[in-house]
Amino acid sequence: MSEKDERNSDAKMISILIALSESETEWLTLSEIGGRVVLPKNTVSAKLSVLTDNTFVERKGNRYRLGDKFIQIAVNYFRAVEADARTALNDFNRRTGANNG
């Protein structure tokens, strides 16, 4: 597989993750995901298989939702943002003499 094909494949998986993250409902069917990402069902199914095998997506019957690994990445990101904000606030307090908690 060429580098361009790999990037295209990665982009398809990312679009599936985005579709799941933007869903108004927790679970989506293969057809619903395919309609949102405008990809053939067989392509979506193959990508979902990889994402499911790696716990980025969870499958229950014929429905899919974001999985544990995706959620853990989000939690880690928010922890890092919180730590950065805390550092910035502490720096602000130190420089101004303010005490914001």
Image (cartoon, rainbow, N blue to C red):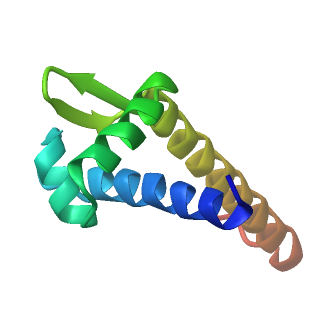
| Number of numbered discs visible in the structure rendering | 0
Residue 37 in the figure: left or right of residue 3: left
- Residue 83 position, x and y percent, is 71, 51
Return the x and y of residue 2 as percentages of the image width and height. Answer: 71, 59
Quadrant showing the C terminus: bottom right
Answer left or right for 26 relative to 59. Answer: left
Q: On screen, 83 above or below 39?
A: above
Q: Position of residue 33 (x, y in %)?
A: 21, 52
Q: Nearer the viewer, residue 26 or 2?
A: 2
- Farthest front residue? 1
Q: Find residue 59 and report its image quarter.
A: top left
**Residue at horizontal 55%, vertical 55%?**
10
Say which residue appears at 13% left-offset and 28% top-offset.
Answer: 62
| Residue at 47% over, 33% down | 50
Q: Position of residue 28 (x, y in %)?
A: 15, 43
Position of residue 77 relative to residue 49, above or below, is below
The reply, left or right, for residue 88 in relation to residue 100 is right
Q: Give the residue at x 35% y 53%.
A: 16
The answer, for residue 56, to whether it is visible in the render is no
Q: Residue furthest right?
A: 95
Residue 66 seen anywhere in this rendered image of the structure: yes
Instruction: Place residue 63 in its image quadrant.
Output: top left
Image-based side of 50 in relation to 93, left or right: left
Q: Quadrant of residue 36?
A: bottom left
